[in-house]
Structures are given as C-alpha cells and as structure tokens.
Image (cartoon, rainbow, N blue to C red):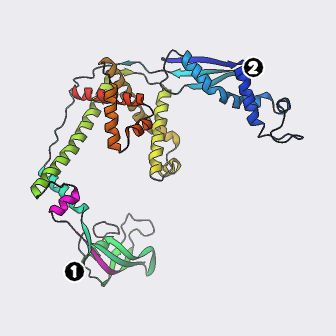
Amino acid sequence: MAKNTEKVTIKIEGEEWSKALDKAFKKRVKEVHVDGFRKGSVPKDIYIKKFGIESLFYEAMNAVADDAYSKAMKKAKITPAVEPSFDVKKVDEKSVEFELTIIGKPDVKLGKYKDLKVKKEKADVSKEEIEKEISHLREQFAEIRVKDEGKVEDGDTAVIDFLGTVDGKELEGGKGENFPLEIGSHTFIPGFEEGVVGMKVGEEKDLDLEFPKDYVKDLAGKKVKFHVTLHEIKTRVLPDIDEDFFKDLGYDKVTNAKELETEVEKVIKDRKTQEIDDRFLEEVLSKASENMEIEIPEEMLDDEVHRMMHQMEEQLKMQGITMEQYMQFSKLSHEDMHKNMEPEATKRIKYRYLLEAVAEAEKIEVTKEEADKDAEEMAKNYGITKEELIKAYGSEEVIMYDSKMRKTLDFLKNNN
C-alpha cells in the first residue's frame, strides 16, 4: 500500500441495511410491471421472486453510502487529501461491506526556500513607452467620420462593392456590397487594398491581381480581376490632447499634456511592477519547490487535472463553447488533454504543499480579523458583499486558509 494511504472497511448490516433495502424496493416497484398487479402495488415477496433481491442492492448501497463515508472518516487515522475511492467488497441480503481507500497529504521535506538569490527586475518606463500608450489611448477614443472630399488613404475605411472574376467567370465568394474595408487590415489578397488607395467616392476601378502561390489549391497563382465601386470613405479622427480627452480617460485632475504623461507613466509603471512581482514570485516558488522533496500520488494528480478540466469547461461555457466542441476544434482526446494538463497540475500541487509546509515551518497564522479584512477587500474588488464571497468560497475556513496562503506568499517575497 502506498505511503500515507489507509484502507478503512465499513459494514452496514441489520436494521440499517434492511431499511435501505426497503427504501430501494419502494423506488424500484414503481418502475416494474408484473402481470396481475397494478404498477407500484406488487408485494415485496413476489417482486423478489421475479426480479431477485440482487436488483435492490445498487439503490440500497447508494442510500447508505453517505453514512458509510461518515463512519469511515471517524474511523480513519488520516485526513483525506482527495475524495476517497469506494469499493464494494461484499453485498448480500444481510449486509454490505465497503472498503474506502483514503489518500492522505503527502510528506513534504522542505529544502532551501529563503535567500534564493532570485533577481528582481526594475520597473523602468521610457519616454517612447509613454508616447506609445498615449497614442494607443487616442486610437481608442478616435471618432469615425465620413470623408466628404478627398481620396482613400491608409487607415481609412472604404465602403465598397466588389466583384471578382477568374478566367471571365464570377469568383465564388468573390462578391460583396457595401463592404467596409479598413485599409491596412490586409483583409484581401496582396494588391487589393493598395489598389483602393487613392480612389474617390463614386469612382469605379478594375484591379488586375494574382492570387498568392500558397493560396487555396484551385486558385493559387491564378490571375483575378476585381471590379470595385467606392461608395463612402470613413476616416478616424484622433481626439485632441485637451480637457475633454482627459475627462474621457477618467483623469479629472489632469489639466495639460505633461500631467497626462505623468499619469500614464504611473499606470505603465504599476502594470510593469505587477508583472515583475508575478514573475519574481513564480521563480521563487519554482526554485523552492525544486529544493523540496515530495511524492505526489497518482490519485492526487488525477484529482487536480479533473479540477482544471472542470475550470476550463466553465470558461469555455462562458464563451458559448462546449468541451466536446473544443476537443473537435483542437483534435484532442480526453486522454490527450489529461496528459497535457499534468505538468501544470503537478506544479499547482507542489506549490500548494510548499506554501503549507513553509507556513508550518515559519509558524505563520492568520487571525479572524485579518481574514475578515482580506474578505472585505476581495469582495470590494469583485463588486459583491462579504457574505456573497464567503458563500462562493464555501466557508469562512476556506477564506482563512486562503488568507494564510497569501500571508505565506508575502513572506516568501520578502525573504528572497
């Protein structure tokens, strides 16, 4: 038997098992038909004679499973780290005997986890980065206007009709009306957008082009003629760097371009600092976990992978995609996905037990007041009440554990 594993045998018999069989019979008798009796009114002895007592065992075992689990947990000498597995050793009309295999927490032998000499970068912000960010912000708040005069330029959106022909025949899928083509998006084959640049509203033009050599087999390298009619030109007008722009950004106290640069520099620096902190902590955890000794049971790894797959399924659901659809798109089987997730699952387990071991070694504890403060802060960030947060986490104990792990992470950051 593997280390930190315990097998507990629980026997349900006598009146408890008899009641479970009666309960199973009352459910099953409603589902069967016996000649000469109304559905649901077959006497128990006749039911057993026709279907056998064995037909009740499955339902009866389900009825006593929770009680068997509770008894096993009281009897066990270790705390389960994953859901224990049930095995039915024996079942008859007198009793049922379950064997529960309980996998406890793995033993952890800490190695070096302080003073790991992990280099931490500095969050420097260049003038070019500030200018690029301000330019990006202006793009976000750009106004789309119809250009009444002038020609199509790079960055404009040309509203066009187009018709493509190959060898004098209309190209399948090569026709569009009032199509908004953003110049510079490279939506069409090379040369198309370049051909539209310079056109005026109302102008018609033929573009003699050639499909790329690596295009779809039937069209690769072939000549194509597009007849294009330009209906409208839309252009992006960037906002002026003025008070209206500052207010749109939410910078009510900013009054000039210099102050905007200062605010943007702070935002970039905060973002960089967070990214640097995340990378630094990841390296600390990686090194510390490499220095420790831990044996991860296969059952624990499977449990973590299944948890990750469930999380992924929920995320996909939010995007309107089922797990089955994702596996079809990615051409991955359930086994492939399981194998692909194992390295990340292993890392998560190592980090979790590393933090627990460090917290124990350093006697890191969290008071209820500290946990409450953390819960209030998290609830505020999520835009929910503290009570809703606790409900989402499952219990206050889970919040306490989470706060303790956060405190341990801070300890590692401050001692490396």
Above or below: residue 378 compared with residue 246: above
**In the image, which is nearer the foreground, mark 1 or mark 2?**
2
Residue at 40% across, 68% down: 220
- The x and y percentages for residue 275 are 25, 41
Q: Secondary structure under badge 1?
A: loop
- Residue 42 lies left or right of residue 75; in this view the side is right
The location of residue 352, given as percent across then percent down, is: 38, 28
- Characterize the local packing of mark 2: few (<14), some (14-19) or many (20 or more) Cα atoms within 10 angstroms: few
Q: What's the CA distance linking mark 1 and mark 2?
A: 94 Å
In this rendering, would 66 be left or right of 263? Answer: right
The numbered dot on residue 213 is none
Residue 281 appears in the picture as rendered = yes
Question: Above or below — where is 193 with respect to 411?
Answer: below
Residue bearing the label numbered 1: 150
Q: Do the residues labelled 1 and 2 touch (CB within 8 Å)?
A: no
Label 2: state its secondary structure.
Answer: loop
Residue 410, image x and y in percent? 26, 29
Question: Is residue 38 in the magenta section?
Answer: no
In the picture of the structure, the residue carrying the numbered disc 2 is 94
Q: Quadrant of residue 373?
A: top left
Q: Give, as a three-letter code, the residue at label 2.
A: Lys
Front residue of 356 and 365: 365
Magenta-colored span: 228-251
Q: Where is residue 146 in the image (x, y as percent from the top left)?
A: 27, 76
